Image (spheres, rainbow, N blue to C red):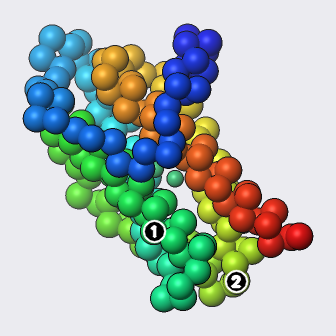
Amino acid sequence: MEERKTQARASYDVSIVRPQMRNEDFKIRGRDMEPARLKAINKGLLTLHTLELMAMTIYKFQLTRQKSELNRQLIAAMCNEMTHYQDFQVKLYEFGLRPRLTRWAFWLVGFAFGFGSRLLGQRVLLKTSVWVESKAVHHYAELLRTIDWDEETRRVIEKDQADEDGHINKWKKLLDAQAN
Ligand SMILES: [Fe+2]
Ligand SMILES: [Fe+2]
């Protein structure tokens, strides 16, 4: 399983910020699933959905009005996180599940991280994002390892995890560029 995951991750194109979705890509899922499997999927999707709300809020509040390369990259990252949020919202409804009503709490956390790090300057901002994204990549790995996803949902999660990896690389590059 570990090997398959690595192979799969290597094949995702993280330069695609918002993958295309056709009408036939939407499906009613989980019809013949065991309750225990569905329960695990429910928990996993709720976690991912709320995490992505936090992520898109962080980038939204790190943005300033300055016409800079950092802001251009932050806009792309925000759009990418909005896509992830949408991915998991769609999956929740496809499985007949519903988002968490208390997810606004993650908006607050995202706001605190985003706005707080923006006030502390660009280096802290970038380091905060690297830290948050690294946590996300681990979280994703755990959910991929412990939950028996259907193949299509697994691929969405793997692509989104690869995107988080891409974000880490992007912020690290900007940090390196600043150091020189
Ligand atoms: Fe994300
Ligand atoms: Fe991310």
Residue 145 visible somewhere in the drawing: no
Residue 69 visible somewhere in the drawing: yes
Query: How far across and down, in percent of the image, does residue 21 sit?
Result: 22, 38
Disc 2 element? loop
Which amino acid, mark 1?
A: Ile
Looking at the picture, does residue 139 appear above or below residue 33? below
Looking at the picture, does residue 43 appear above or below residue 122? above
In the foreground, 177 or 6: 177
Residue 148 picture quarter: top left
Query: How far across and down, in percent of the image, does residue 120 sit?
Result: 69, 84
Q: Residue at x 59, y 46 (%)?
A: 166
In the foreground, 47 or 172: 172
Q: Residue at x 31, y 22 (%)?
A: 152
Residue 149 picture quarter: top left
In the foreground, 28 or 8: 8
Looking at the picture, does residue 37 appear above or below residue 108? above
Q: Is residue 82 left or right of residue 164?
A: left
Which amino acid, mark 2?
A: Gly
Circle number at residue 121: 2
Q: Could you tell me how far apart the alpha carbons at marks 1 and 2 are, in whole angstroms?
A: 18 Å
Task: Kindly indicate whether the residue at mark 2 contacts the one at mark 1 (C-beta within 8 angstroms).
Answer: no
Task: Provide the residue designation for mark 1.
Answer: 75
Residue at the right extreme, as displayed: 180
Q: Nearer the viewer, mark 1 or mark 2?
A: 1
